Image (cartoon, rainbow, N blue to C red):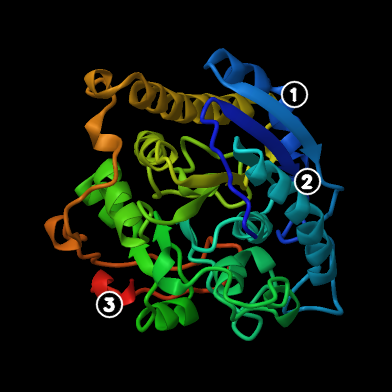
Amino acid sequence: MAVKVTRQTNKIVLLGSATSAAALRAGHERAPAALRAAGIADRLKGAGFQVADHGDTATYLSQPDDEHPRARNVSAILKSLNDLRPRAEVAVKSGALPLILSGDCISVLAVIAGARRYFRNVSLIYVDRDGDLNVPATTPSGCVDGMVISQVIGRGAPELVRFWGEPPLVREPDIALFGFERLDAPEIQYLAASPLRRHASLEVSTVGAAAAARLALERVHAARHEFVLHFDVDVINGEEFPWTNLPGAGGLSLNEVRDALRVFASQPNLAAFVVAGYNPELDADGQGARKLIDLLAEVLAMRLEISTAAAAGPGDQAAAPAALSVASASSSEIAPATSAEIPSAAGSDDQSAGASATELPDASESDASQS
């Protein structure tokens, strides 16, 4: 659609996707309301943003589904996506940054579709501890949140692939998996020949979260394309953030996640920011909600600081941290670390036995050939 979207970097649209239908248990659907009650809007306003709250979708719950054991609750999930998509379109068109408070990761499909209403090329930065590359034929649980990237690239449950009329929603070379460490054996096998960009947790920790984030942005062409940022809170080490369905040892530290998100969120081509995976049912005293709000407010405040400095003129731009800009160096200048082992997916949403790999070669290492 030929509609010019004028970005207003001092504005945020809050939008809730109240769903747990794609998860293994209920609770995610309460995340938008819990974060509002904990004061997310006031914190963002205090950081200098104008905040418009566009409300929530209807509520969609995780339930047993014996009729669809390979893609549980697929009908409810499709309804949730069709509920969220027009709301996401309105938020994107407004020019403000849409901040989608979601229960389930699958909501990112509707957000990407909303962005693609106005932008032809949309990339995806997928910050998540799991690869989410299962398909109905390989999933041991039927949990659709374990198939999100497969749906985005057009190889998942047919009902959800057809959600976007002309799949894929995003080309594989324009997707970066960031911070992952839990993969099932079929996911490892698929990645071995896939052009998906990938930055495993070990690599992020080895080269530094900010440097890895800049490289991920460069590799999905974020300087030229709009991109959607997906952030599943389970990527944070479970000792620091246990308020999610599948916390665990390992993962990225809270500081590493903060450093990476600061880089991602400061980019001018960020089309939408999706936050998923927080479960208020596991957070009786609200500590998790407060910690998550602190993280988001700090990350987004940096976005406002940089945009304000850029608008002030060249003389003031030096105040904006240069480390947050997309790197102009080639991929070879920040070499991905070699992973000695990719841990199994025993703790992923599919909860399978998983498999390990000594190293996953990146089939997309030559960015120029994929542009």
* Amino acid type, callout 2: Ala
* Amino acid type, callout 3: Ser
* Amino acid type, callout 1: Ala
| Label 1 Cα crowd, 10 Å radius (few <14 / some 14-19 / many 20+) | few
Image: 153 above or below 263: below
Q: Residue at x 40, y 77 (%)?
A: 191
- Distance (Cα) linking label 1 and label 2: 14 Å
Residue 119, given in percent of the width and then of the height, sits at 55, 57
Residue 197 relative to residue 121: left or right = left
Q: Are marks 2 and 3 in contact (CB under 8 Å)?
A: no
Q: Secondary structure beneath disc 1?
A: helix
Q: Secondary structure beneath disc 3?
A: helix
| Label 2 Cα crowd, 10 Å radius (few <14 / some 14-19 / many 20+) | many
Checking the image for residue 18, the label placed there is 2
Q: Which one is in front, 247 or 130?
A: 130
Q: Secondary structure beneath disc 2?
A: loop
Which quadrant is home to the N terminus? bottom right
Image: 365 above or below 287: below
Residue of label 3: 369
Residue of label 1: 37
Q: Quadrant of residue 112?
A: bottom right
